[in-house]
Image (tube, helix red, strand yellow):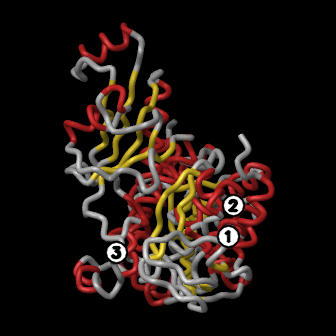
Amino acid sequence: MEIYRKLQEREAAGKPIQAGLVGCGQMGSGMVHAVHNVEGMAMMVIADLVPDRALAVLAEIGVREQDVVVTDVRGKAEDALRAGKRVVCTNARLVPELEGVDAVVEATGFADNGAQVAWSAIVNRTPVIMLNVETDVTVGALLDRQARQMGTVYTVAMGDEPGVLMLLYNQARVMGFEVVCLGKGKNNPVDFTMTPERCAEEAAGKDMNPKMLCAFIDGTKTMVEMAAVSNATGLLPDKPGMHGRKVELGELSRRLIPKADGGIFERRGTVEYSTGKVAPGVFAIVSSDDEHVRKDMKFFGHGEGPYYLQYRPYHNCNLEVPMSIAEAVLYGERTITPLRMYSEVVCVAKRDLKAGEKVGGIGGGDFFGRIYTYEEALAMQAVPIGLAEAGRVTADIAAGAPMTEQNFAADSGTFVYRLRKMQDTLIGQEG
């Protein structure tokens, strides 16, 4: 692909890709800067519940106050875009409806909001790029199917671990390798009891929302990321929650392989994470039975095999999102999307939950996420991670126990709930 050249041509023609952003937090604001530095691309619309955050980041990239229109009125917003001005709004669903927006990036991290924005983008045939993986692992299979039927693009973004791991997976498969394991490094031990209050000081030091940091520490983010990878590739967690062993980089291709060959896995074809010194990198363990290929791999410095490590020592999160925007708009390409539901992230109680309680959201003090195979989650009638927020406990749940339809009632009034019921009916486990 000649992505950079195509973008240069658009810049020269005065027709840059005009992107819209929903959610101007830590990741979203960084992405505005990233897009600003790319020829042939501009962030023209930003939706956030706190408009001052969007205004501040636009000022940081040199946009003058008189060149920004703050409005939730569609006509005024489209007039502003035609005049070459930026738009700031509070209505997330307005962004994909605007004429002149070539692609929408959803970066809120809230499953219901992500579902609404993605659906609206698809209905309006506008490519949508998700930094919101929580939505993807809940209803991404349906959203991708609908986008393809509508002739547009739904995709999770490059830069976060799922997108980068899909890059490694495609590269390995096109070289003819079997992918034995796809995994990521995790830079902190998992603490399933973490609360936003306990990590508030650390979050402030990192300029993060405490709930976001909490979701990293309690393992939910890792489970969500690897479920997205599983659903896009068919690779499965070897056990609920994965193993999460501390394995150093040089040992990955000797440990994260089947037990029959000295490793830890019961199955071939897994998703996994390691708390060794792998982060912020991602990796693929690949294999080949072809003797000539193994001879070549030895010559190229990869050792005897038959298992080899393919390692990318970084993922640049929001800074790599412009690649997904460009691929979606210029070529109609997707970075990573679900094939179907191979894995589910299930809600597990962090503390004893009492009947009648209303629970908070991801990164709170009530539950964390744990990856299961979809079949296991289905048999448990488990609550998907994207459906828990604002639901009610219907029977006491002990700390460490899964939340299921027998002890928990999700909020059936949310948009993501309705999409999930539609997805369960139309897709489920179909191939």
For mark 2, does the 10 Å Cα neighbourhood hold few (<14), some (14 to 19), or many (20 or more) residues?
many
Mark toward the viewer: 3 or 1: 3
Secondary structure of residue under mark 2: loop
Query: In which quarter of the view is residue 205 placed?
Result: bottom left
Q: Earlier in the sequence, mark 1 or mark 2?
A: 1
Asked if the residue at tag 2 contacts the one at tag 1, i.e. Cβ–Cβ closer than 8 Å, the answer is: yes
Secondary structure of residue under mark 3: helix
Q: Is residue 100 left or right of residue 282?
A: right
Q: Amino acid at mark 2?
A: Thr
Q: Earlier in the sequence, mark 3 or mark 1?
A: 1
**Residue 96 - label:** 1
Q: Which residue is mark 2?
A: 126
Q: Is residue 412 left or right of residue 55?
A: right
Q: Which residue is mark 3?
A: 213
| Image spot of residue 10 (x, y percent) | 55, 51
Would residue 38 be seen by someone viewing this image from the given angle?
A: yes
Query: Measuring 32% from the left and 70% from the top, which residue is drawn there?
Result: 217
Query: In which quarter of the view is residue 212 placed?
Result: bottom left
Q: Give the spatial CA distance, label 2 vs label 3.
A: 31 Å
| Image spot of residue 55 (x, y percent) | 45, 85
Q: Amino acid at mark 3?
A: Leu
Q: Give the spatial CA distance, label 1 vs label 2.
A: 7 Å
Q: Nearer the viewer, residue 107 or 65?
A: 107
